[in-house]
Image: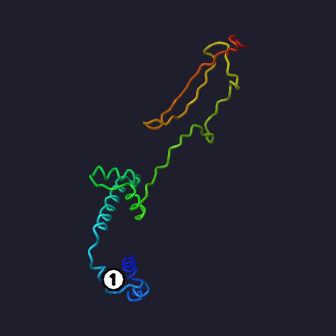
Amino acid sequence: MKFSWIKQHREVFDLAVMCDVLQVSRQGYYAWQDRPAAPATVRRQELLGQIRQINAASDQTYGSPRIQVELAESQITCCVNTVARLMKKAGLRACAAKRFIPQTTDSHHDQPVFENVLNRKFTADLPNRKWVCDITYILTGEGWLYLAAVLALLRTLKYGREHH
């Protein structure tokens, strides 16, 4: 850990001063530099490269669970926590698409508005005289679908008799 920090800051600070402050020897630093990376480090770097590829291919919409599934499908075994930890360390995040929220009423327009001829009188003396309708959106497995309802108004019955 100390040696990697020294390597990252070689251009900023003097090597002898950094080794002295961190209480490590310069010979130890040079030996660490020449030492091959540990197998676990190499595996993490390879795994991070594959995570970056999957993240880019998904337009950065896949999080660690979906990336772990993609890796498993490619015969690469690792747990979702490892993927999450590597993604966090590398600054990779899934960017969720903004949810579509349907808007059924746009009151700020210059189109003509029809007058309210029913005036909340939702009964009719004869069939086929008054009609009401409405529209809404329903989220389904296929996405948002419209639902339009049209009803003919009738007389209301109260206690089994017509009410006038």
Q: Is residue 156 above or below residue 80?
A: above
Q: Which residue is mark 1?
A: 29
Given residues 157 and 82, the one toward you in this image is: 82
Residue sitting farthest toward the right:
164
Q: Position of residue 157 (x, y in %)?
A: 68, 14
Q: In which quadrant of the rendered view does residue 132 lie?
A: top right
Residue 69: % across, % down:
34, 50
Q: Nearer the viewer, residue 15 or 53?
A: 15
**Could you tell me which residue is drawn at 41 percent across and 58 percent down?**
84
In percent of width and height, residue 81 lies at: 40, 57
Determine whether, in the image, residue 49 is placed left or right of residue 156.
Answer: left
- State the image quarter where residue 14 is shown: bottom left
Q: Looking at this view, is 14 or 132 the one in front?
A: 14
| Amino acid type for the residue under numbered disc 1 | Tyr
Residue 49 figure quarter: bottom left
Number of residues whose C-alpha sits closer than 10 Å to that of mark 1, classed few (under 14), some (14–19) or many (20 or more): some
> Residue at (60%, 15%) from the top-left corner?
128
Does 108 sit above or below residue 20? above
The coloring applied to the image is: rainbow
SS for callout 1: helix
